[in-house]
């Protein structure tokens, strides 16, 4: 199939692109001019890069007649960032809405969207797709707004759509998030101080996430598709930051790298757990990586590629 991937040079997109190439899909990567493609530099000759300068360029890009779109591109800004509202509305609402418009007016068959667990109201219970949605922050609010537009488009056109709501992705070549910072500390023997580490969160390894997208492509193009669905992707098992630190001590054989005890940032999420039963029944997906297996894979990778940290 001819598939357009937005965010294909990013963390999740780069892993997904590599995997889809193994299935002989013809892949097109939509990027803004100046995007750093370091994660996929070694496979650039196997994909078609489609750079754009403005949203007006999208009409010409859709002349390639894609069979489907996988939308991963997103923008996160803190609410107090100057221009945060305008920037996130443009990238997280306007941009994908125009993608939808072009996709639904061409022969494009499907649109797979990427959501986030932060779209749910915080709860101590495992979150299902029926849980109350309530954007945790401005970023999540923009994702929820686009979800409404996606549902509307799905019900008024022949375009098949679905959203995968991801719970705490982590893995090799990730952005500078907590697990990456901890990896850097252990690999380079640089002591790090973090919070008390009591947060219990549902971390999902990148290869499990890639598998979810592949299952979603199979589902959305099959006779099993019955209309738009939002689907949780997580492992239904929480782990604390302190436990992650202990696991990394065991994996690396190093002690006294992480100090726990700093105060929590304002509004810190202390619990987030995913019920993935819908993904299992609808997509035939289930996670294969425990947190320990995922951390070990990442640690081994960065031992060989320390400059990627």
Image (tube, grey):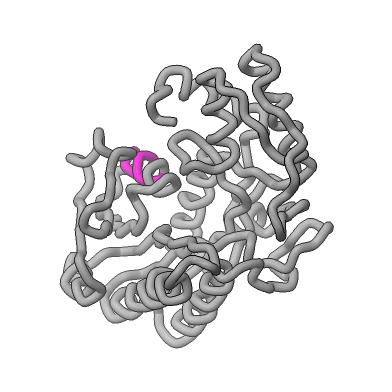
Q: Quadrant of residue 41?
A: top left
Q: Is residue 75 left or right of residue 64?
A: right
Q: Is residue 88 depicted above or below 38 in this figure?
A: below
Front residue (pair 231, 172): 172
Q: Quadrant of residue 198?
A: top right
Q: Is residue 81 left or right of residue 4?
A: right
Percent of width and height locating residue 52:
20, 64
Percent of width and height locating residue 13:
39, 49
Query: What's the residue at 37%, 44% (across, down)?
Result: 14
Percent of width and height locating residue 88:
44, 70
Query: What's the residue at 63%, 58% (across, down)?
Result: 232
Q: Residue furthest top?
A: 253
Q: Is residue 235 depicted above or below 253 in this figure?
A: below
Front residue (pair 231, 259): 259
Query: What's the residue at 28%, 46% (across, down)?
Result: 36
Q: Is residue 97 left or right of residue 242?
A: left
Task: For the N terminus, give its image quadrant.
Answer: bottom left
Query: What's the residue at 77%, 52% (across, down)?
Result: 271
Q: Does the magenta segment cover residue 261?
A: no
Q: Quadrant of residue 248?
A: top right
Q: Residue furthest right?
A: 124
Percent of width and height locating residue 132:
73, 73
Q: Is residue 229 depicted above or below 260 in this figure?
A: below
Q: Is residue 31 left or right of residue 156?
A: left
Start-end of magenta stretch: 16-22
Q: Main secondary structure of the magenta part?
A: helix
User: Does the rendering let one see residue 47?
Assistant: yes
User: Does the rendering let one see residue 96?
Assistant: no
Task: State how many labels appear.
Answer: 0
Front residue (pair 197, 8): 197
């Amino acid at each position: 199939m001819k598939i357009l991937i937005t965010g294909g040079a990013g963390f999740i997109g780069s892993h997904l692109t590599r995997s889809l190439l193994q299935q002989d899909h013809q892949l097109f990567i939509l990027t803004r001019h100046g995007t750093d493609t370091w994660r996929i530099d070694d496979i650039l000759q196997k994909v078609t890069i489609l750079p754009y300068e403005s949203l007006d360029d999208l009409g010409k890009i859709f002349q390639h007649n894609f069979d489907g779109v996988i939308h991963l591109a997103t923008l996160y800004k803190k609410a107090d960032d100057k221009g945060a509202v305008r920037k996130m509305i443009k990238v997280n609402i306007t941009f994908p809405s125009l993608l939808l418009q072009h996709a639904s007016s061409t022969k494009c068959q499907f649109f797979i969207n990427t959501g986030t667990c932060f779209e749910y109201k915080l709860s101590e219970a495992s979150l299902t797709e029926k849980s109350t949605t309530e954007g945790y922050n401005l970023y999540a609010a923009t994702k929820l707004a686009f979800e409404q537009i996606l549902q509307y488009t799905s019900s008024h056109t022949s375009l098949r759509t679905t959203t995968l709501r991801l719970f705490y992705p982590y893995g090799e070549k990730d952005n500078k998030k907590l697990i990456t910072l901890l990896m850097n500390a252990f690999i380079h023997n640089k002591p790090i101080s973090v919070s008390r580490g009591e947060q219990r969160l549902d971390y999902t390894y990148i290869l499990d996430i890639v598998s979810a997208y592949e299952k979603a492509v199979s589902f959305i193009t099959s006779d099993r598709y019955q209309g738009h669905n939002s689907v949780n992707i997580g492992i239904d098992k929480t782990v604390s930051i302190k436990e992650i630190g202990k696991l990394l001590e065991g994996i690396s054989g190093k002690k006294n790298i992480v100090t726990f005890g700093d105060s929590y940032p304002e509004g810190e999420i202390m619990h987030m757990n995913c019920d993935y039963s819908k993904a299992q029944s609808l997509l035939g997906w289930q996670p294969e990586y425990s947190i320990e297996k995922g951390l070990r894979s990442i640690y081994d990778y960065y031992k060989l590629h320390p400059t990627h940290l």
